[in-house]
Structures are given as structure tokens and as C-alpha cells.
Amino acid sequence: MRFGIVGAGKMGGEIEAMASRRGHDVVWKLGSRENTGGAGLTRERLSDADVVFEFTNPAAAAQNLSALARAGATVVCGTTGWDGELPRIVEEFRSGGGALVHAANFSVGVRQFFELAKLGAQLYPPAGYAAYLVEEHHAEKRDAPSGTARRIAAIVESESGTAPSIASVRAGTVPGLHRLVFESPEDEVELVHRARGRAGFARGAVWAAERIAGQRGVFEFGQLLGEARGQS
């Protein structure tokens, strides 16, 4: 497959390396200087790629996604912090006839962590345990709490009726850590996901691109994983 990448940062580099390992070609990459306001996402450029990855920042993502939707592109978006624009973006992709896979986190390990969080929230709060969440990321990450932390908190609130507090740390080069704690006066239980690097996120994103090729519509990454489990 032929890939385009919007975002010349570290995740863009990880996706390029992962794509090569899985036998794909990256035919172009766009940095912020070449793509102010989505201007670099021309139909001519987009026609060269089967799937486009959007990994930029919250301020740029909505503009990029609108431009990609209008062009009918097939897109995998891992940028977080633009949730408020999701309903509009969904309609634009449906109107444009393209496809979008979006997620706060493309790590398969994190997606399974969501299931553990759901189970923990069913078991511990009814037994008198209170929940809180700590997340740590590198100093360059813009949004806090992370999209993954917000998703975990939403799961816990949905299952237990109480939203956990979230503490966010932005420092150094931490790829990502999420620690969900259920505590009582007598003891505590921790569920931890610690990313060792960005490769796990890139692997999930490239897998999503392989999965979405030729489809139309808007999908959350977990939907694709669920479909794949159902077919195994």
C-alpha cells in the first residue's frame, strides 16, 4: 500500500518505519510549514496515497481532517484533543465518501487495558474502593489529561457512577504511562500500562490502515479490533 503522512514529528517517523517493516511505501510526508491550514492536502497529492495518517497537534487536526474529508480520503488519525469537533468531522467524512479511523491511542495493549478498567470498575467501587488515575507523558505532549486518560475515566464513571480524579504529568521523554488505582483504607489495587516506546502505537495505526483500505465511513479503533476478534 501507499501511505501519506501528515505530521513530521516523532510519531510520523515511527509510522514510516513500521510501514516499511510491513511492506508498505510512504510516498509523501507533510510538515507544518508545507501545510498551513491544510493547504498542502491537495487532491493531486492525496491521489498518490491509499491511506493518509494524521498525527499532528490539536490545533491543526480539525483543519487537516476537514480537508481530507472533502477530498474523500482514507485516513487514520491519532491526534488527540479535538474531540469537540468530532460530530462535524464525522458528517464531513460521510458526505465526502471517505473513511476515517480515529483513536486516542492505537496501542493494542491500551485497548485491552480499557477492558480491565471496565472490570475493575465493576468490582472495586461497589466494595468500598475509590478510584483515581495518574497519567505521565513527555514534555512535548500538548493536551492534558491525555485522550487515553479521559477514556479510562469515562469507562470507570460509566461502570461505577463516580468519575475518578486524574493527575497529569508532562516531563522528560516519557512515551506514556497510565495508572488506574482502586484504594480503600486497608489496601489498594493498581492497573498499569507503561509504553516502552512509540512503536506499539505505530503498529496499531498501520494495522488500522491495512484494515480500513477500501472501506467507507467513520470508525473508532476499538470497532476494528472487535471486528477482527469476531472473525478469528
Image: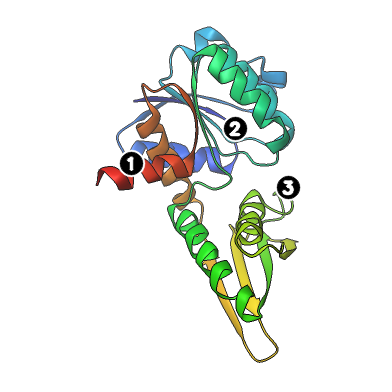
Q: Are marks 3 and 2 in contact (CB under 8 Å)?
A: no
Label 2 crowd bin: few (<14), some (14–19), many (20+), radius 10 Å: many
Q: Secondary structure at mark 3?
A: loop
Tell me what residue is drawn at x 52 percent, y 58 percent: 114
Mark earlier in primary sequence (1, 2)? 2
Q: Is residue 43 left or right of residue 27?
A: right
Q: Is residue 28 left or right of residue 86?
A: left
Report the quarter where the N terminus lies: top left
Tell me the colour scheme of the image. rainbow
Q: Is residue 104 left or right of residue 229?
A: right
- Tell which of 123 and 184 is nearer to you: 123
Relative height, residue 83 to residue 161 (above, below): above
- Tell which of 9 and 57 is nearer to you: 57
Tell me what residue is drawn at x 62 percent, y 16 percent: 67
Label 3 crowd bin: few (<14), some (14–19), many (20+), radius 10 Å: some
Q: Quadrant of residue 183?
A: bottom right
Q: Nearer the viewer, mark 3 or mark 2?
A: 3
Tell me what residue is drawn at x 31 percent, y 39 percent: 22
Q: CA gap, disc 1 to disc 2?
A: 20 Å
Q: Secondary structure at mark 2?
A: loop
Q: Would you say residue 41 is visible in this rendering?
A: no
Q: Tell me the number on the disc at residue 21.
A: 1
Q: Nearer the viewer, mark 1 or mark 3?
A: 3
Q: What type is the residue that disc 1 sits on?
A: Arg
Q: Is residue 27 left or right of residue 120?
A: left
Q: Tell me the number on the disc at residue 143.
A: 3
Image coordinates of residue 224 in percent, x first then y, are 41, 39
Relative height, residue 141 to residue 52 (above, below): below
Q: What type is the residue that disc 3 sits on?
A: Asp
Relative height, residue 154 to residue 81 (above, below): below
Residue indicated by mark 2? 7
Mark earlier in primary sequence (3, 2)? 2
